[in-house]
Amino acid sequence: NVLDASKHANATAACQSSTRVNLQHDMHPATLCLSILSLFASQSVASALVTKSMTKLHHPSQPPVPRRSSSVAYDGDDTTSGDAWRERCKLSPSSASSKSLSSLRSSTETLNECNNPMHTFGILTDIQHAPIPDGHSYNGTPRYYRHALTAAKHAAEHFEEEQVQCVVNLGDIIDGKCADVQQHLGDEVQDEKKSEVISVSHDAIDDVLNALSRYKCGRILHTYGNHELYNLTREGLAEKLGIPFTLEPTGDLVGYYTHSIHSKQHNLQPSPLKSARNNSSLKLRFLVIDSYDICLLDRCPDTSPKRKMAHDILSKNNHNYPRDENSPEGLEGLSKRFVAFNGGVDEPQLAWLEQSLQSAKANGEKVIVLSHQPIHPCSTFPTCLIWNYEDVLSILRKYSNVVIASFSGHAHKGGYIRDEESGIHFRTLEAVLESADPIRTYAMVDIWEDRMVVRGFGDCVSDEYDLNHLTFDSNAVLKENVQEVENDFQLEMNRV
């Protein structure tokens, strides 16, 4: 009927005004028809056609490309190797290097799959730069403190080139050895020069921020980890990283916050018709969790209730404390998480998390959760888990139709699990610090209406995750679509 209407006497006027609704010569025929409809069809016909065509337009006949949704975990150095983790992800070590999205997709993609993603953000973790020679971790893993700065700069330039909507830094931007450098040099210099030496940590973090400043087209969302707290106060982190800390009634600062982004405008279909999944996915909210809410680090021993809580937790669960507070020796299983370089999440922040998820659900937003420490016990090895991960995980599971995924750092080898109960994806990202020159480790995350793709660079594992656990309010979106068609039709008639 729409095509027949082109023979109508008003067809010429409709074609002349087509540029005003951004018609394109290479549009999908169904999309083109619906756009023409908004020019000269009646409101009732438009509403009927929207109802009739939604399923056909957004569920094409071609079979979809299979999505990966299996539960795969990396359990750390004590259970498997990095190569085994890649094998379990069905990716060879070489395929974990720089890959464009086109290399992951077939040439027989469906109409929706040919579109650009609705959201893209850059992500990296555990840069841990320090102005010192290369070294090793406590278990002998090589660490490249200076090259990490070069890698961060390269990642930022790539993020800017790709025009990602925002960048996520998952914490540990500098290494704790910066504090050792200060102390070591401070013992050897005269008093009048100590003021110059004390700036090593500040200079190091400024160097990383300067490297990341190559990314200019959006906001950088910072979390912080234990290594920042070895060097700076929370007040200093607020100034340097722009983290909006909350001053709780206890007198302690806690750095949890939220940030929302909208869909990339150039990816929107010119047609007023949108699918239920497409429309809901246009709204994305990041929830940044402070996993060092309850901890020993930078909490006053005399006045901080949160430090007392941390002291009590470690005293009860780790017999090495306080003599060797960072040692999990003698602990078994998940009890290994009770070490002093970890932390927990207090009740006020848990309440904020639930309220934020409720708000996101009410607003039709989907959520990405960010934290330095991993939340799911199967996404990492036990020594890196949040102390009370169960409390955080139980809240997220209640909003399985809202939460897309959780991203974290801290565990340098990376890991992944899809939670069987909720379908939420939990991804631990590989560290920048442990990739030798010329390898530069970071990722870009693309989000479509039905999947999320991690494009890994350097030693970061690439993968694709199904989003079939999310739900959408189709009736509400249909009503909005119909209203948009009617509004566009009325505006066009007024202009004619």
Image: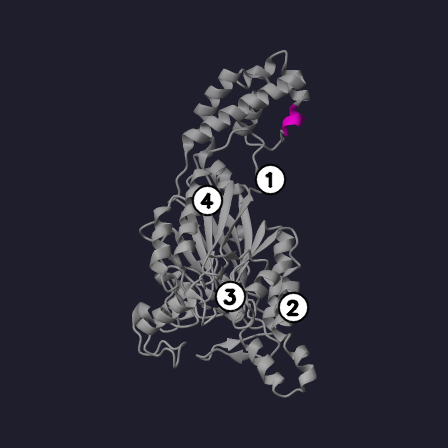
Residue 427, above or below 61: below
Nearer the viewer's eye, disc 4 or disc 3? 4
Q: Which residue is mark 4?
A: 366
* Residue drawn 55% across the image and 42% down it: 262
Q: Which residue is mark 2?
A: 207
Amino acid type for the residue under numbered disc 1 = Gln
Nearer the viewer's eye, disc 3 or disc 2? 2
Q: Which residue is mark 3?
A: 459
| Residue 105 seen in the current view | no
Give, as a single range, the part of the protein colored magenta. Answer: 18-22
Question: How far apart in space, not on screen, are marks 4 and 2 (Cα)?
Answer: 34 Å
Identify the mark at residue 265; answer none if there is no mark. Answer: 1
Identify the mark at residue 419; answer none if there is no mark. Answer: none
Q: Is residue 19 magenta?
A: yes
Mark 2 / mark 1, whichever is N-terminal: 2
Question: How far apart in space, not on screen, are marks 4 and 3 (Cα)?
Answer: 28 Å
Mark 1 / mark 3, whichever is N-terminal: 1
Query: 70 or 243: which is nearer to us?
Result: 243
Mark 4 / mark 2, whichever is N-terminal: 2
